[in-house]
Amino acid sequence: MTSSILFVCLGNICRSPLVAAVARQRFADAGLSVAVDSCGTGGWHVGQGADPRSIRVAEEAGYSLRDHRVRQLAADDFSRFDAILAMDDDNLALLREHSPVDDKDRVSLFLDAAGLDPYVPPIVPDPYYEDLDAFRHVLKLAEQGVDGLIGRLRRGESLAAASRSAAR
């Protein structure tokens, strides 16, 4: 049973904190006890808050990101979390590169682990250089993806096992 999930993007200011905020609230609303955190593979923003645009779209939808503080991926994250879910292929590759051999099956793409329609691109695009609508798109993917995770968790499925990213 998955009891902890780490969401990972590049800088931990846009995508992964937004997905984590959605997951915290929706897991709680669904009565699931799953610890959630987020981090970045890069360390440029460590200690800072989320991107103001992520905060804005989160608040518009009723999620809280004001207390988020950026952190970088740590070696012990691989032993602390049951599932480590990357937002895109580049971060997935970095995670797999740093993951201990016996933990690679717990590392996958977020949208793959969510079991979304295979015709949907399995990445959450980085909105950093885009407008507010790109951040709203990330929020929509976060909500759809987290709802997919909730369904899989309720069915007792492993989040990594059904992931198409395992073959990447």
Image (cartoon, helix red, strand yellow):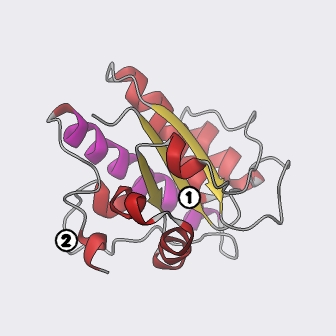
Residue 108 visible, this orientation: no
Using the image, determine if residue 47 lies above or below residue 29: below
At 34% from the left and 71% from the top, the residue drawn is: 122
Q: Magenta: predominant secondary structure element?
A: helix
Q: Residue reaching furthest top?
A: 31
Q: Which residues are magenta?
A: 132-153
Residue 109 lies left or right of residue 6; in this view the side is: left
Give the image quarter of residue 29.
Answer: top left
Camera-side residue: 102 or 88?
102
Residue 85 lies left or right of residue 8; in this view the side is: left
Residue 43: image location, x then y, percent: 79, 64
Using the image, determine if residue 41 lies above or below residue 64: below
Q: Tell me the crowding category of disc 2: few under 14, some 14 to 19, or many 20 or more residues within 10 angstroms, Cα based.
A: few
Camera-side residue: 38 or 60?
38
At 26% from the left and 47% from the top, the residue drawn is: 148
Is 31 within the magenta?
no
Residue 72 lies left or right of residue 99; in this view the side is: right
Using the image, determine if residue 1 lies above or below residue 49: above
